[in-house]
Amino acid sequence: MPQYKAPLRDVRFLLNEVFDYPAHYAQLPSAEDATPDMVDAILEGCATFCEEVLAPLNLSGDQEGCTIADGEVTTPKGFKEAYAEYVAGGWQGLSHPKEYGGQELPMSMNLLKAEMMGTANWSFTMYPGLSLGCMNTVFQFGSTEQKNTYMPKLVSGEWTGTMCLTEPQCGTDLGQVKTKAEPAGDGTYKITGTKIFISAGEHDLAENIVHIVLARLPDAPKGTRGISLFIVPKFLINADGSLGARNTVKAGALEHKMGIRASATCVMNFDEAVGYMIAEPNKGLEAMFTFMNTARIGTAVQGLAHAELSYQGSLPYAKERRSMRALSGKKDADHVADALIWHADVRRMLLTQRAVAEGARAMIYHAAKLADMMVAGVAEGNQAQYEEYDDKLGFYTPILKGFITEMGLECANLGMQVFGGHGYIKEHGMEQIARDARISTLYEGTTGIQALDLLGRKVLLQTRGKCIFNFTNEMIAQAKPHLLSGGAIGTMARACFKRAMQWKALTLRIMLRANKDRDIVSAACYDYLMYSGFVMMGHFWLKQALVAQDKLARGGKDSKEFYTAKLQTAEFYFERLLPRADGHKKSMLSPTRSVMQMDQEHFSFI
Ligand SMILES: Cc1cc2nc3c(=O)[nH]c(=O)nc-3n(C[C@H](O)[C@H](O)[C@H](O)COP(=O)(O)OP(=O)(O)OC[C@H]3O[C@@H](n4cnc5c(N)ncnc54)[C@H](O)[C@@H]3O)c2cc1C
């Protein structure tokens, strides 16, 4: 079973040496508490909580799962106590306003926390994670009264929240939502309908659950323009803030699912439940998607988490387990056979996991800085700043969510593969990682939907390629000074330069073709997304390699081994993973004919 250890050396490398977070926090408004010492103390505290409290519940939580009786859900043993400890530690309100009892640290601190918690125990992380979406919505769109009623309890973690979008007939296409909201005549609404797949919809961790629900008013236009947003608490709140009557919203069932079994995924039945409108009528979907970028980057963290955990699980096994002799001759002569780690194919699997985890972490830490700037815009009422950074984040989001979760899933499978048949056996905990990782490419917008968002919306419709040109210009600026360098850095810089030029050209070709053949957007988007992911990760690997090279050149007291291994992992990425971009390039440029020509009736002759 993987014994999770928070990768603090790599975290500090990225925070302090690559992205200069101390300078970033110093210029961020209201981040005066985020001093380097404070940030380090939070990282240490979070690591201890994750290693000692959450990680030990990961396997047992999966084995036990959640149970339901008469609409009440019981979480696995230990979850309630762990959640109480989480609340007592003030972890939920880390990045929320002091006005509501939070610590008001930058949003990025929340993402750092989410990585450690999610790697230790993704199922547990779902409970406080869904509350974040709920809090963001109430904070941004709630009336003063709604904020005062709900925010303090959500920020403290005494109450949790949900996001109730999905219904049996629709998950992606929310224009089909049927749940009804009828005015009750007293300013409240009666909410009636069924939502499915609702994470943390019901559980025993908190005394109240605040549902954010998409529903339609009686006279609402059809489609996405007729959806409104409502707060529906499990227990109504009395005027003095105490809990009142039980609302008529109840968990009808728990979904039986492949992974994240300790996370309660519920069918929620609303039977004329009391709801309070939030945001303007028929503008619910827009409001819901306000903080979508940060929610989706939160799911990208899941890809990183599973890549890291599978690496941490498979590395010790590869050092201990012995099989045959290395092709280049005996390595462990005193033993009956050499350790797995001597075999090149096993090293390929280990290094892939490491390169993906560390590459993804760098991509996410970069995006987290943008998220801080966006949130600062909201906090200061600076709409222009909010929009500027939301747009920037909007470009990274589908690539991070789509690419990192797909790669996290691949890494989870590689971790199992290192264990051979033992990876398939439950007691080692490796198959659990693969099962838990599987959902990450499905919820918060499937990979296909992320790919359509990137190519269709962000590249073609909204920016006519500008978002790609801006990013590739950054790639070129980083690579250019090193094009004539010798050794690995020169090779990597030239690869980045070449890929940046290629990405621009590819984007132009797809744009021209899309004018004549609309199907190309859907036919090419997956390959375009994966191509973009591989190339973007290359840029962030070069960034890390440049710092590592510089540190090595300067000497000093820092460990030489860390920087050498960093450079070696970067080399592996450029030689073994980045070339996969070529396959995606070829595939995306192929005509749509072979995808679209087959008659629907001819897909099967059974
Ligand atoms: C464990 C779990 C937890 C979840 N938690 C929540 C939650 O807390 N709250 C909530 O509201 N929902 C939640 N969901 C629902 C989840 O977000 C949806 O399942 C997801 O958005 C996909 O919707 P769908 O299942 O209806 O698939 P569909 O929308 O039916 O999609 C099916 C397939 O068709 C593809 N597709 C759909 N439309 C297009 C298109 N226009 N072009 C190309 N391809 C397309 C999709 O990519 C996918 O491959 C959860 C789901 C699970 C399994």
Image: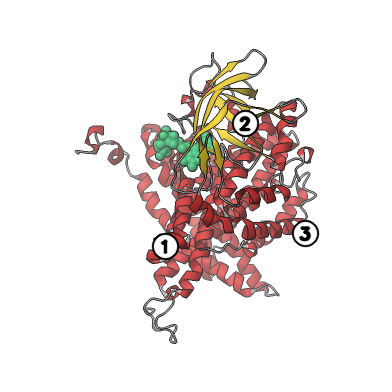
Q: How is the image coloured?
A: secondary structure
Which quadrant is home to the C terminus? top left
Residue 352 horizontal/vertical position (percent): 47, 62
Q: Which amino acid type is shown beneath numbered disc 3?
A: Asp
Residue 193 horizontal/vertical position (percent): 51, 24
Q: Which residue is mark 2?
A: 234
Task: Report helix, strand or loop for mark 1.
Answer: helix
Q: Are marks 3 and 1 in contact (CB under 8 Å)?
A: no
Q: Are marks 2 and 3 in contact (CB under 8 Å)?
A: no
Q: Which residue is mark 3?
A: 37
Real-space Cα separation, disc 2 to disc 3, in angstroms: 40 Å
User: Which badge, 2 or 3, comes first in the chain's sequence?
Assistant: 3
Q: Which amino acid type is shown beneath numbered disc 1?
A: Gly
Residue 142 horizontal/vertical position (percent): 69, 28
Residue 410 horizontal/vertical position (percent): 44, 55
Res. 334 mark: none
Question: Is any atom of residue 494 visible in this view?
Answer: no
In the foreground, 263 or 397: 263
Say if 351 sits above or below 155 in the image.
below
Q: Is mark 2 within 8 Å of ligand 1?
A: no
Q: Quadrant of residue 130?
A: top right
2 or 3: mark nearer the eye: 2
Q: Residue furthest bottom?
A: 334
User: Which badge, 2 or 1, comes first in the chain's sequence?
Assistant: 2
Task: Report helix, strand or loop for mark 3.
Answer: helix
Number of marks in the rendered image? 3
Q: Which amino acid type is shown beneath numbered disc 2?
A: Lys
Question: Is any atom of residue 240 visible in this view?
Answer: yes
Res. 423 mark: 1
